[in-house]
Image: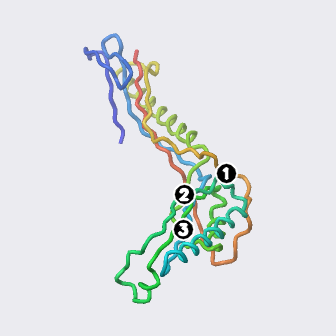
Amino acid sequence: MKRFFFTFAVVAITGSLHAQDIQVNRQNKTIAVTADESTTAYAEVAVLAIGYHNYGPSQVPVFRENVAAAERVTKALLDAKIPKANIETDKLRLARTEIDEKWTPDMKKERQFVAEQSWHVTVSATDAQTVVDLAVKAGANEIDDVEWNVVDPVALQARASGAALAKARSIADQMAKGLGTKLGELVYASNRALVPKMWRGETVNTEATILAPPPPPPKLTLFPQKVKSDATVFAVFSIE
């Protein structure tokens, strides 16, 4: 929802707007506008949540099985030419199981301990489905939500901010005309938006697939989401 604020000659007080010392008085006539805008782009980056968990009756065998499975999964990822910097350990857990009363006696006996490992794997959006297929084929038994993004989220946010400022100027211009005056220069502007996540150290190829062909069916189908960036701009314009 848009919010509009304006000041003009009949205002006889002196004040300040936001952190800037913008004087509002008869000699300094202004119009202030707050405008929201969004912009979208096709996903270029996918962050996959991949993991493996297993149960067992005793601690050491459970951990050994988990480590062996983890080695198979990570080897498959590295063999697919995914850089090590793009594979990050997210969770590592070895614990006594909280028994579920719905389990059968045999299940309770065989599930005394649980081990878990999971990773965040950053790849290009076009490679996401192939990577998931490779990981599952290698033994991964946990796939969580995919985080979609663009290579340069700062640029996407800048586009949203520019669009919001343009909207603010258009609104202010219409307000000025309604007051029988003319819109002047931009005096002050601020942008309220989330700080975009930067991809530190990752190498993401968005132009060509570098991975091995996917395994035979059954095959998972991923549909990349569009990435959205929101911006709210507060702008103050002078009027003549």
Label 2: element kind: loop
Q: Is residue 210 above or below residue 52?
A: above
Name the image quarter holding residue 226: bottom right
Kind of residue at badge 3 = Ile
Q: Confirm or deny contact between disc 3 and disc 1 (CB under 8 A).
A: no
Kind of residue at badge 2 = Gln
| Left or right position of 136 against 171 | right
- Reading the image, the residue beneath label 2 is 225
Cα distance, mark 2 to mark 1? 17 Å
- Reading the image, the residue beneath label 1 is 204
Quadrant in which the N terminus is drawn: top left
Report the residue at 38% width, 33% height from top.
Answer: 34
Quadrant in which the C terminus is drawn: top left
Estimate how packed mark 2 is, as few (under 14), some (14 to 19) or many (20 or more) residues with alpha carbons within 10 Å: some
Residue 221: x, y in percent?
60, 69
Residue 155: x, y in percent?
58, 39
